[in-house]
Image (cartoon, rainbow, N blue to C red):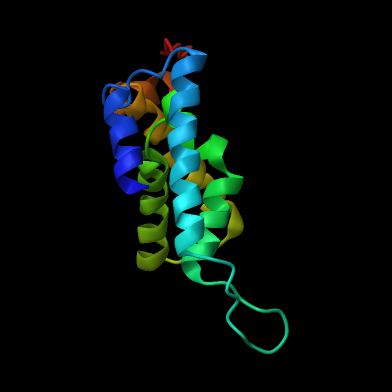
Amino acid sequence: MHDFLMELYHQTAQGTKSINGMENRAIWRAKYAQICQQAAKEEPYNAIKTRGKPKQSKGRNLLDRLIKHQEAVLAFAFVEIVPFTNNLAEQALRNVKIKQKIAVFRTQRGAEIYARIQGFVNTVKKHAKNVFQELLKVNTNQAICWKTT
């Protein structure tokens, strides 16, 4: 599956284009289904015996999620605005987690203010703008207008 997803990623020109044409999409979906069928043979429904509800293996749980969420897994290739990874989202959360470790927020309101400022700063950076200049615009009530891509 890893090799398949990496091949599909490279086919979409390093994640900048989507796979066009229903015929091409059908081919990729068929390959995905074939890999899932092969995995189903290697990871059968052998429940691990415990008290109560039987548990499946970790591999089988992963396979079930890959089958159930096929459209979401392949979305990066079929929808242009969907990125291959969620690195930007993880990077945005990393600052908050570090801040929690360093300083405990004294109030809920303080945490909300920090989160709002960080959200603004991250958005400004994503638009490749100068954070200081954009903060000045906000404080002087100048309109902020960014062209979205």
Quadrant holding the C terminus: top left
Quarter of the image where one finds residue 28: top left
As rendered, which of 73 and 21 lies closer to the eye? 21
Q: Position of residue 100 (x, y in %)?
A: 42, 63
Q: Position of residue 73 (x, y in %)?
A: 48, 39
Q: Position of residue 146 (x, y in %)?
A: 42, 13
52 sits to left or right of 13 = right
Q: Residue at x 48, y 33 (%)?
A: 30
1 sits to left or right of 46 = left
Q: Residue at x 37, y 39 (%)?
A: 85
66 sits to left or right of 118 = right
Up the image or down, 98 lies above or below 92; here it is below
As rendered, which of 89 and 99 lies closer to the eye? 89
Does residue 85 appear anywhere in the picture? Answer: yes
Quarter of the image where one finds residue 126: top left
Up the image or down, 72 lies above or below 127; here it is below
Q: Residue at x 51, y 57 (%)?
A: 40
Q: Residue at x 43, y 19 (%)?
A: 24
Does residue 106 appear anywhere in the picture? Answer: no
As rendered, which of 116 and 38 lies closer to the eye? 38
**In this view, which residue lies farthest toward the bottom?**
51
